[in-house]
Image: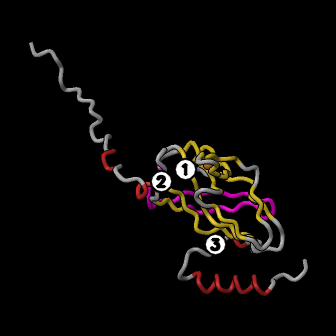
Amino acid sequence: MSRSARPLLAIAALLCLLGASALTSCGSDSDRADGSIEVTDAVVFVPPNPSQAAIYFTIENSSDTDDALLKAASPAAGKAELHHSMTEGGMASMDEQAKVDLPAGETVTFEAGGLHVMLTDLEEPLEVGGTLDLTLSFAQAGDHTISVKVVDGVAAASEGMEDMDYEVDGGAHEEGHADDS
Ligand SMILES: [Cu+2]
C-alpha cells in the first residue's frame, strides 16, 4: 500500500460528496470501494424488437491500473453480451467481444454504432421511464451493479408507429355465430 489517496482522486471524491445531496449520479455506494471505475450515463433504448435491446454508457477508469470489462449480466434478460457494431460498405454487423479493454486513466464510451451491451431474451418489455439493473464484471475492479434508464429513442426516429394499437381488439370477433336458423 503506497500512498492511499492521490490528490486528483481525493478532489474527485470531495466533489462527489459535495454534489451527492443534489445529484444521484455519483455512484456513492460500493461503486467507489476501490475508487477506480465509474460508470455513468447508462441508458437502454426501447427496442423495435421487444426481445432484445442495446445498453450504452460511459466507463471511466481513473486508476493507474489497466482494467477490462469482462462480462455483463442483468436480471431483466436471459443473456447480456458485449458487442461491437461496425458498418462496412453499408452493411451493419455486430461482433461479440470477449472483453473490452479499459486502459488506466482513460474513458471508454459505449454508444450507438460502436460498443454496447446487448440484452437478449428480455424477461418483459421495457417501459420508457423505468430502469433495469446491469452488473458489469471487471478484471480488476470486480462487479459493479448499475441502474440503466429506459429511454425512448427509436420512436422519435421512426414516425408512423401510431397505428400499432392492435392489442385493443385483435380483430378476433367471436360473437358472430352463424346459426341464426
Ligand atoms: Cu449487439
Q: Distance between the residues labelled 2 and 1?
A: 7 Å
Residue 143 picture location, percent across and down: 72, 60
Residue occupied by mark 1: 53
Residue occupied by mark 3: 27
Residue occupied by mark 2: 46
Q: Is residue 82 magenta?
A: no
Q: Mark 2 near mark 1, Cβ–Cβ under 8 Å?
A: yes
Q: How crowded is mark 1: few (under 14 residues within 10 Å), some or many (20 or more)?
A: many
Q: How far apart are marks 1 and 3 (CA)?
A: 24 Å
Residue 169 lies, with reference to residue 138, above or below; the image says above
Q: For the point 59% across and 50% down, which residue is it?
A: 75
Please state the extent of the stretch shown in magenta in the rendering: 126-148
Residue 111 picture location, percent across and down: 60, 61
Q: Mark 2 near mark 3, Cβ–Cβ under 8 Å?
A: no
The extreme front residue here reads 89
Q: Residue 53 vs residue 71: left or right?
A: left
The amino acid type, in three-letter code, at marker 3 is Gly
**Mark nearer the viewer, 2 or 3:** 2
Residue 22 picture location, percent across and down: 53, 82
The extreme top residue here reads 181
**N-term-proximal mark, 1 vs 3:** 3
Q: How crowded is mark 2: few (under 14 residues within 10 Å), some or many (20 or more)?
A: many
**N-term-proximal mark, 2 vs 3:** 3
Q: Give the structural element (helix, strand or loop) at label 2.
A: loop
Q: Give the structural element (helix, strand or loop) at label 3.
A: loop
The amino acid type, in three-letter code, at marker 2 is Val
The extreme left residue here reads 181
The amino acid type, in three-letter code, at marker 1 is Ala
Q: For the point 77% across and 60% down, which residue is it?
A: 101
